């Protein structure tokens, strides 16, 4: 399978079927948020922690976008045949101040023990009134161990963004109660200890309920301590 085909299968055109229950809910939610979030992108765009750069073509398709730069760590084995446009040490972005109009960082901030440090560096390379778009998980298992640091609440994220100088901060759920439940089912059938046969059977048995949850999920715009208090992940949009 080519890298482009792998990207499409895993990030852009993820089919809703029993074998994809573990990843369909998060990746479909992130993709929907990216499509919505990049509409207002313009000028030069930096993708921090870009990985396989699955959203590169989407960003480039935005009429007001002039350039896209994918940035990630110096780990060629992680990318396979995909090399980022720009490599960094995870601390300092090797560009001058105010180099980019927009920055995106999907499923990135949870991996930093001091998120405000990396947010300050992102703020530094952004131009005035630039747009920052990001997503973070909430219902998700430990991953990229030991570099998995946080599961943020909207209040902690807002504080970190305010402390680093961002303004017009909007934080919304990637998915609501039903999507969070579906995501937990997907993780359970995908990763919990069980034999291969049982796993296959449970994927088939739970799939109709999983589909129901995904299709009937309702996202909310504000958070409270009751009906609007559970979410699968968060999407953040802020201005420099």
Image (tube, helix red, strand yellow):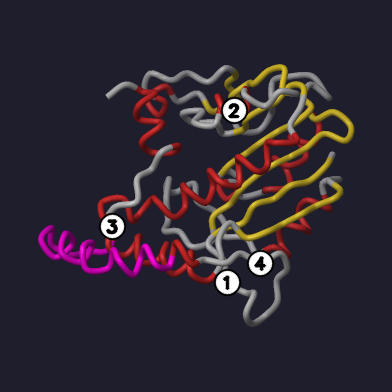
Task: Find out whether the residues at labels 4 and 1 contact each other: C-beta distance under 8 Å.
Answer: no
Residue under pointer 4: 220
Identify the residue at horizontal 37%, vertical 62% (top origin). Answer: 211
Residue 99 position within the rendered picture, expressed as x and y whole percent measured from the top left? 79, 21
Task: Find out whether the residues at labels 2 and 4 contact each other: C-beta distance under 8 Å.
Answer: no
Task: Tell me the number on the disc at residue 158.
Answer: none
Task: Find out whether the residues at labels 3 and 4 contact each other: C-beta distance under 8 Å.
Answer: no
Residue 202 position within the rendered picture, expressed as x and y whole percent measured from the top left? 20, 66
Task: Tell me the number on the disc at residue 190.
Answer: 3
Residue under pointer 1: 230
Q: Would you place residue 170 above or below residue 220 in this image?
A: above
Magenta stretch mostly in which secondary structure?
Answer: helix
Q: Earlier in the sequence, mark 2 or mark 3?
A: 2
The image quadrant of residue 55 is top right
Query: Which mark is in front, 2 or 3?
Result: 3
Of 105 and 14, nearer the camera is: 14
Residue under pointer 2: 89
Query: Which mark is in front, 3 or 4?
Result: 4
Residue 107 position within the rendered picture, expressed as x and y whole percent measured from the top left? 55, 45
């Amino acid at each position: 399978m080519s890298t482009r085909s792998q990207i499409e299968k895993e990030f852009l055109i993820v089919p809703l079927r029993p074998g994809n229950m573990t990843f369909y809910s998060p990746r479909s939610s992130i993709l929907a948020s990216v499509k919505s979030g990049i509409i207002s992108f313009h000028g030069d765009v930096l993708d921090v922690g870009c990985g396989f750069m699955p959203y590169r073509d989407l960003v480039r398709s935005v009429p007001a976008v002039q350039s896209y730069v994918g940035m990630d760590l110096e780990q060629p084995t992680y990318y396979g045949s995909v090399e980022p446009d720009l490599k960094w040490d995870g601390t300092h972005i090797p560009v001058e101040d105010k180099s980019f109009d927009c920055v995106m960082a999907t499923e990135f901030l949870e991996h930093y023990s001091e998120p405000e440090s990396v947010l300050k560096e992102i703020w530094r390379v952004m131009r005035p009134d630039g747009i920052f778009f990001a997503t973070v998980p909430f219902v998700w298992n430990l991953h990229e161990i030991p570099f998995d640091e946080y599961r943020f609440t909207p209040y902690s994220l807002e504080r970190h963004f305010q402390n680093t100088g961002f303004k017009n901060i909007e934080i919304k759920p990637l998915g609501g109660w039903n999507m969070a439940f579906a995501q937990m089912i997907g993780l359970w059938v995908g990763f919990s200890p069980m034999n291969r046969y049982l796993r296959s059977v449970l994927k088939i048995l739970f799939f109709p309920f999983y589909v129901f949850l995904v299709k009937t999920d309702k996202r909310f715009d504000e958070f409270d301590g009751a009906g609007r208090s559970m979410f699968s992940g968060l999407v953040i949009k802020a201005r420099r």
